[in-house]
Each structure stands twice: as structure tokens, then as C-alpha cells.
Amino acid sequence: MEAAVAGEAGVPGEAGEGGHIRRRPLVWVAGVTAVVALVEAVVMVATAALLSSVVHGQHMSLAGIKPSAIALGGWVGCGAAAVFLLVCAVVLARTALRDRAPGRAGRILLIACAVVHGVLGAVSTGLLGWAVFAVMMVVLGLLVWVLLGYGQDARRGAPGPAGPSRPEAGEGHVQFKEKPAE
């Protein structure tokens, strides 16, 4: 059976030649951003492994804390960041596959991810150099592109609550009416 035409059975996209669905460019941006977030999660785990091995190899201690505790802290911190990035990758992949804006929780998660990338990009400039800053800003740009691109769709095509989109005159205000004549 050939792919469904746009609008049938809730399949997003446009019908192309031969009845196949052509995906919008935004779907590809969301998919690429999901892959980038997945790669970042793998890099976080690799960073934890590297930091742990360096701490154990050098027998480093910080204010009397055991090296094993420092290594465990590195694993926990990088592991939490990796899980966060994996959840973001799942939200982005789901957004790309469904070609619909993420829900409220998904948008909040992606906004938090964008803010983290912006802050880490600013911090990384001084510590790690301009190349890391550029990578962080590319990821930030991809996240913002997905958020803004699907935000327009949500405002334009999503069914909203019934009724007018703007409050009408007097709505929400106390209005006193005269008592009817007796």
C-alpha cells in the first residue's frame, strides 16, 4: 500500500509524486538535532570515563575527599547530563517522526536544554576555546530552530479552545446592570 495522502488518517506532510509523503525541512532539522543530542550524550559518558580514570590514576584528592568519591561524583554528574540529553533526543525524535510540535513538557525540556547550551557555550569560550563555543552555539541554534518552527505550527493549525481568541469588551470585568423597573 502506498503512503497516505496528507490529511488522511492524521498523516502530516505533503503528497509528492506517486502519492509518497514529502517531509518538510523542519522534520529534518528535528531529526538532526535528535542525533546531535544523542552524540552529546555519548560524549558525556566518554567524558565521565576519562575523568574517572584520570582521578584514579593520579590519586587526586580535593580537601580530603577520597579519589573514589570524586570519580563517583564525575560519573553521577556526567550520567545525569547524559540521561537529560537522551530524553531530549527522544523528544526531538518523536517530534520529527510525528511532524508535530512537542507537548508542553517537551517544550519546557527543550527550552531548558537550549538554555543549558547557551550557558555552557558562554562558559566554554574562556575555558575550552572558540571551537567548543561554536559547537554549542550550533546546537543552540538547532534547538531554537525546532522550537520556533513548530511553535508557528502550533499557533496556526492546532485546535484551540472554542470561542474567540481575544477577550471581548467587558470580559473579566464586573459589570453592573440596572435593576429592571418593578
Image (tube, helix red, strand yellow):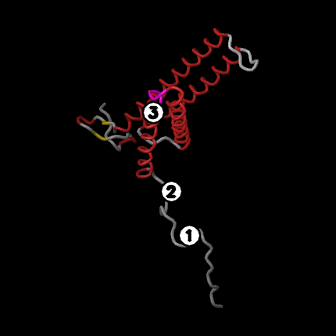
Q: Residue at x 54, y 17 (%)?
A: 46
| Contact check, label 3 and label 1, Cβ < 8 Å | no
Which label sits on residue 139? 3
Mark 2 vs mark 1, foreground winner is 1
Gap in Å between the C-alphas at discs 3 and 1?
A: 43 Å
* Residue receiving disc 2: 161
Q: Position of residue 162 (x, y in %)?
A: 49, 59
Gap in Å between the C-alphas at discs 3 and 2?
A: 34 Å
Q: Position of residue 85 (x, y in %)?
A: 53, 29
* Number of numbered discs: 3
Secondary structure of the residue carrying numbered label 2:
loop
Which quadrant of the figure contains the N terminus?
A: top left
Report the side of 108 relative to 158 (left or right). Answer: right
Give the vertical position of 165 relative to 151 (above or below).
below
Which label sits on residue 39? none
Give the vertical position of 173 relative to 98 (above or below).
below
* Residue receiving disc 1: 171
Give the vertical position of 85 relative to 100 (above or below).
above
Magenta-tinted stretch: 129-133
Q: Position of residue 126 (x, y in %)?
A: 53, 30
Secondary structure of the residue carrying numbered label 1:
loop
Q: Is residue 82 magenta?
A: no
Residue extending farthest to the front is: 126
Gap in Å between the C-alphas at discs 2 and 1?
A: 16 Å
In the rendered image, which quarter is residue 182 located in?
bottom right
